[in-house]
Image (cartoon, grey):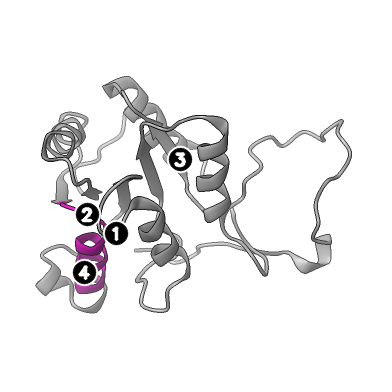
Amino acid sequence: MDYDLSLFTALVADDNAYMRSLLKSLMHVIGVGTVIAVDDGSEAIETLRKVGEDPLKGGVNSIDIVMANWQMTPVDGMLLLKWVRWHKDSPDKFMPFVMVTGFADMGHVSEARDLGVSEILGKPYSIQSLTQRLGQLIERPRQYVLTPTYFGPDRRRRKSESRLADRRKIKPEEIEIIYDDEIS
């Protein structure tokens, strides 16, 4: 990945001080200009609200990506993700969201995917795995989908037709595809 990320702002939420510091350092190493680190999801929500309401009070013009640990207290990464995607006060429902987790099994990945996560970064992670996830967000952005029970990036990554039977419970006419055409 060869991008200038110096104007990029990332919000890192992790209740473990060491992991928060590590992720913040790695983001700076790959060239991210501003990294805001907070202790948990509730602080992340307050930061997002502040920046959304008044960027001067928030200290940055905008937040370009959220990276959150799944397991935090009192507000974990999944509740933060739900807030970003669904809450009326969320400043950007289209914001790329990377869930950082030690639980990268298929069940946990599916659960996060079904709530609208953009990428999963499994622990332990390396600078290579971090740059791969960011590269996916930059090089292969997915359109956003809105259904009665889901809002987030299209969960299907493959463009080819599946050989499996269609297992969707929702009819194609019930799905609305939403694009983020706003320039930040």
Amino acid at dot 3: Glu
The residue to which callout 4 is attached is: 46
Is the residue under label 1 in contact with that under label 4 (CB below 8 Å)?
A: no
Q: Earlier in the sequence, mark 4 or mark 3?
A: 4
Q: Tag 4, which secondary structure?
A: helix
Give 79 or 50, whichever is nearer the viewer.
79
Is the residue under label 1 in contact with that under label 3 (CB below 8 Å)?
A: no
Q: Residue 35: x, y in percent?
A: 16, 47
Cα distance in 3D space between marks 3 and 2: 19 Å
Q: Tag 1, which secondary structure?
A: loop
The residue to which callout 1 is attached is: 75
Q: Earlier in the sequence, mark 3 or mark 1?
A: 1
Q: Earlier in the sequence, mark 4 or mark 1?
A: 4
Amino acid at dot 2: Asp
Residue 119's disc is 3
Q: Quadrant of the C terminus?
A: bottom left
Q: Is residue 176 left or right of residue 49?
A: right
